[in-house]
Amino acid sequence: MTLVTIAAKSIRQRWLASSLTALSIALGVALMVAVLVINGVVTRMFSQNATGFDMILGAKGSSMQLVLNTIYFLDRPIENLPYTEYLKFKQKKWVAHAIPFALGDTTEDGKFRIVGTIAEYFDLEYIPGKKFVLQEGKFLTDSEDAVFHAVIGARVARAYGWKAGHQFPIAHGGNTADIHDEKFTVAGVLAPTGLPIDRAVFINYDGFYKISGHEKPLQEAEIEEKARRDKELMIPAVQPGTSGPAGEHKASGKETMSDKQKQVTAILVRVKGSDLERSALVYLMLPLINKGSVAQAVNPIFQIRKLLDDVVGNIRTMLLVMTVLIIIVSGVGIFVSIYNSMADRKREIAIMRALGARRRTVFSVIVAESILLCAGGGLLGLVLGHGLVFVAGPIVESRSDILIDPWFFERQELYILPALLVLAIIVGLVPGLTAYRADVAKGLSD
Amino acid sequence: MASSLIEVRDLWKIYQLGDVEVQALRAVSLDIAAAEFVAVMGSSGSGKSTFMNIVGCLDQPTRGTYRLNGVDVSTLSSDERATIRNHQIGFVFQNFNLIPRTSAIENVELPLFYSDVAINEQRQRARDALALVGLVGRENHLPNQLSGGQQQRVAIARALVNRPSLLLADEPTANVDVKNQQTILDLICGACRENNVSLLMVTHSLEVAGRFQRVEKLQDFNQPEAAP
């Protein structure tokens, strides 16, 4: 006999109560694993490395929305900036790259976002140190015949089974009842990045504005332009996707369009210089740009961190606290189970003591039992938790566009078992002391 | 009296039940020599169980001294008494007191586990002890798969496996069918004689008591003037 076999025997003696309490620990741990994995995914997604850009410009409005639009392809697009703002901005000495984004449309079924952008976007690192890689086809080009070309994210390709050469229409303003006549051709399919990029459909910016209804009526554009120049009015440009029927569309897809008629939803900027110079520059430039009446500039990293701290961080903390509570409740369950069994085991403990078991031996038997239950439940929970992530991952992914790698093992999981060990000892303490103090003669005569 | 295994002097056990003071044992004195067989008789309520508990180091006297092998047990701590029980005393109870859902051999291994005997040696010695009581082939049976007589034999093997100097048997045949009573008694007495173990047995049966060199009536302990 060993301590463990004795403890295992008494667990088996009450297998139903024991397995139920171990199961409750397992469920708690499983939940914790799931939370940790999701937490890891979210943290990586909202990490400082979530973007390769230093600054994002957009129309005045919510800075968070601008970041959600451009980095995560989430939330409703904000108002537009005139294309002339983009041209003006591009000329600035400290700007290394300025990439326009035109947002608002979606794929035919409304599932994925259309991003109108330029070829240069694919030359840049999408996150620090990572350049775009194609799994098929080619990137967008500036050539005339590439105007209606598209590069699609890995998940889009997977979801629709699209390959290079496939042609598809897009839905105006995400309205699946309003499908544009123009069709785009898949030029390239991006390799998976594990980032929101996988869910985007990039089309040529020029193509975006060749679609009838996207351009701004020239007259309206000119009036606005004038007003802006006069700095009297602050009219945000109308969103391409939601532009109403107001005014006459003078330009058609075939005609060349005035720059005044084009708009951008956002401008993604990479500034010149070393890391330090870049952050300093962004720090200096933001207030200057924001002082103006047209555009707002945001530091995406700052917004992402804010998002993580304010929203995601709180939810994460809440979930973690909840799972810790669940495990504690399960611990109480184990306590109750063992404690209740003590009455039935008085005689058994008295027999052990009569045969020469020292008090700390019977105490250890009870604590060992608690440890076995907690550890067993914990291991089962780890398996269950990863199983849960494995099963639920794709579902979560398809519904929330959050990408989850089920094989990812979070470092914090290493703390679960030691923490359970501590819990087991605490839980086993009181019943253990009951055993420790048991009156042998009385236990035998009862 | 230095050669006595058990030396009990003026032993009192008083229980406080509310306001009432119950004298379970009153000024009991008794000596038992090494390898001596003694039967203890007495009506119920005469303090037999209390006396056996104190001699078995399961309980402590209110007053008086009890020496086992020259050691004053009444002053020892709970764990020290556990060690004494483990090394020097074997118990055979009326209701066997085997650990349920634990095989015969594991029941016999328990006292060895408590004295930190290595696991292989535990198994070997427990197997030998079970062979001694005629239970070869029943090692892995659970108590509820054994008859009353067989369970008591497991208990005897368990009591003797750690080579005690004293065996305490509390009406060991009371829950055993008539056919097996004689076998159990023979087994206990034979094993004790063979291993020079002192035997102290509580019994109600005059026939059982008749097998013993000495019979102590507990009623007499409480009346010192009537003692011989």
Image (cartoon, coloured by chain):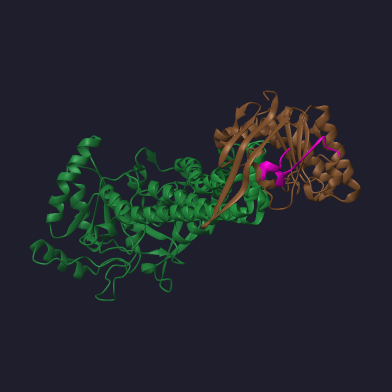
Chain colours: A green, B brown
Q: Is residue B227 magenta?
A: yes
Task: Judge from the rendering whether residue A411 lies leftward or rightward of residue B117; answer left or right.
Answer: left
The image quarter in which residue B36 lies? top right
Nearer-the-camera pick, A287 or A185 = A287
Q: Is residue B128 visible?
A: no
Residue A208 image offset from top left, x and y in percent: 35, 60
Q: Is residue B23 above or below residue B224?
A: below
Q: Quadrant of the N terminus of chain A?
A: top right
Nearer-the-camera pick, A161 or A215 = A161
Task: Judge from the rendering whether residue A268 lies leftward or rightward of residue B123; answer left or right.
Answer: left
Q: Residue furthest front?
A: B225
Q: Residue furthest right?
A: B179
Q: Which segment did they paint magenta? A: B211-228
Task: Judge from the rendering whether residue A117 lies leftward or rightward of residue B154; answer left or right.
Answer: left
Count the labels in the image. 0
Residue drawn at x 28%, y 71% as measured from the top left: A249
Q: Residue furthest bottom?
A: A246
Q: Is residue B188 magenta?
A: no
Residue A57 image offset from top left, x and y in percent: 23, 54
Q: Is residue B143 visible?
A: yes
Residue drawn at x 25%, y 64% as measured from the top left: A79
Q: Residue furthest top?
A: B2
Q: Is residue B127 above or below residue A384?
A: above
Residue A141 image offset from top left, x and y in percent: 37, 48
Residue B138 image offset from top left, x and y in percent: 84, 41
